[in-house]
Amino acid sequence: MQRDLLPIVEGTTVMTKHGSVRTDHILFIAAGAFSSTKPADLIPELQGRFPIRVELDALGEAELRRILVEPRNALVAQYTALLATDGLVLEFGEDAIDELAAVAHQVNSRSENIGARRLHTVMERLLEDVLFDAPESGGPGLRVDRAFVKGRLAALAADEDLSKFIL
C-alpha cells in the first residue's frame, strides 16, 4: 500500500473519469487513527514526504459527548431522524448522552482506542432492538435515559472480551 501511494505523493499524472490530474503541486495531508503504529513503520520515502507528525490526545468523555450532539449530522440526530421515518419519536435525555459518552470512553480506554468511531458501534448496540422493532411497534415514542443505556450496555461494556468484539 505504501509503495502504491509513493508515486502519487511524489508527483505523477493520475487518470480520473474527469481527465488527468497532475499531482506535482498538490499538498498531501495524511491523517488517521494510528494507535499502534510508529513513524518507523512508514517506508523511508514516505517518511520524507510527510516530515511533520503530530500526535493528538485521546478523546475524553466531554469530547465524545460533543460529537454525539453538536455536529450538523450528529449520531443522536441521525438515529432520531431514522426512527422518525417509521413514525417513532426518539428522545435522548442529557443523562443518556452522558452515559453513552462514558461507555464509549470506558471501552476505548480498555481495548483498542478507535476514538469517535466507537460511538457508532455503541449507538448501534444500544438501539438494535428498537431499530428492528420500529416498523411494527406502532408506539408513539421512546425516551432514552441513563437507566435505558445502562440496562442495554452495562453488561456488554463490563465484559472486556465481549466488548472488544462487539463494541
Image (cartoon, rainbow, N blue to C red):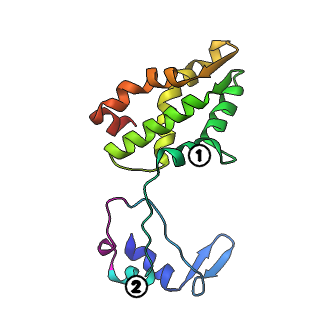
Tell me which label, 2 or 1, sits earlier in the chain.
Answer: 2
User: Mark 2 is on which residue type?
Assistant: Gly
Q: Please give the name of the residue rendered at 38% of the width and 80% of the height, measured from the top-left corner.
A: 47
Q: Is residue 108 left or right of residue 75?
A: left
Instruction: Examine the rendered structure and indicate whether residue 77 appears above or below residue 145.
Output: below
The CA span between labels 2 and 1 is 36 Å
Could you tell me if the residues under marks 2 and 1 are in contact, i.e. CB atoms within 8 Å? no
Q: Picture quarter containing residue 74?
A: top right
In the rendered image, residue 40 lying in the magenta stretch gets the answer yes
Residue 3 is situated, as x and y percent measured from the top left of the image, at: 38, 76
For marks 2 and 1, give the one nearer the viewer.
1
User: To which quarter of the image does residue 108 belong?
Assistant: top left
Q: Nearer the viewer, residue 55 or 7?
A: 55
Left or right: 84 with respect to 67?
right
Residue 43 against residue 77 in the figure, above or below: below
Location of residue 1 by image quarter: bottom left
The answer to whether residue 138 is magenta is no
Q: Picture coordinates of residue 162 (x, y %)? A: 31, 32
At mark 1, the secondary structure is: helix
Given residues 79 and 66, the one toward you in this image is: 66
Q: Dot 2: within a 10 Å radius of its alpha carbon, few (fewer than 14), some, or many (20 or more) residues?
A: few
At horizontal 47% and vertical 30% (from top left) the residue drawn is: 125
- Which residue is denoted by mark 1 in the rendering? 66
| Residue 33 rendering spot, x and y as whole percentages | 43, 59
Quickly name the residue at label 2: 48
Secondary structure state at the residue bearing disc 2: helix
Q: Furthest-left residue in view?
A: 161
Quarter containing the C terminus: top left
**Residue at 33% across, 30% down:** 158
* Residue range of the region highlighted in magenta in the rendering: 35-43
- Please state which amino acid type lies under the numbered disc 1: Arg
Callout 1: 10 Å neighbours few (<14), some, many (20+)?
some
